[in-house]
Image: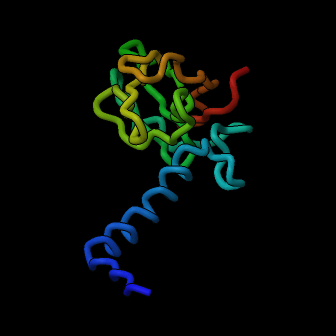
Amino acid sequence: MPARPSASRRTVLRGAALTPVAGLALTACSGGGDGGTPATPTAPVDLGAESELAKGAAKLYRDQNVVVSRAENGDLKAFSSICTHAGCAINKLQGTTLICPCHGSEFDATTGEVVQAPATVPLKELSVEAKDGKIVAGPAA
């Protein structure tokens, strides 16, 4: 029986490098269904000081999967930061644009609307209020 060629160092390293990435991609696109942090708040959650969010700005609360924006008139809006395309947790906010790490969908954090595909459905709106100097968001009323 002829000897089987051994795998090259490059082949072995490439396989080892790709294996964890595949696992992370599946986890990131799970939408929080792994028993850890829920995809969106299921009860009101304190996000921090109201003073941390300037008028005309948005803030991403990664641990709670929420983005909150404040209009120039002071009104607050909150949305789930779970991408509507594949359920990935969005982890990047550039100005008032949310950018999904999985497939590049972009959303307007002030309206929840899609600004770049592949997503076609807007982000889920959440309830939000300023209460005792804190921003509190929760499931839509």
The x and y percentages for residue 104 are 36, 32
Q: Residue at x 43, y 17 (%)?
A: 114
The x and y percentages for residue 36 are 67, 55
| Residue 60 visible at all | yes
- Judge from the rendering whether residue 118 lies leftward or rightward of residue 13; answer left or right: right
What colour scheme has been applied to the protein in the rendered image? rainbow
The x and y percentages for residue 113 are 46, 15
Quadrant in which the N terminus appears: bottom left
- Judge from the rendering whether residue 65 lies leftward or rightward of residue 14; answer left or right: right
The x and y percentages for residue 86 are 54, 34
Task: Relative to 99, say whether 35 is above or below.
Answer: below
Task: Relative to 89, say whether 123 is above or below.
Answer: above
Identify the residue at the far front of this view: 1
Q: Residue at x 35, y 23 (%)?
A: 55
Depth check: give the residue in front, 18 or 129: 18
| Residue 70 visible at all | no
Task: Relative to 67, say whether 115 is above or below.
Answer: above
Q: Residue at x 57, y 36 (%)?
A: 87
Identify the residue at the far top of this view: 73
Quadrant in which the C terminus appears: top right
Q: Residue at x 60, y 35 (%)?
A: 136
Count every numbered label the image shows and give the total.
0
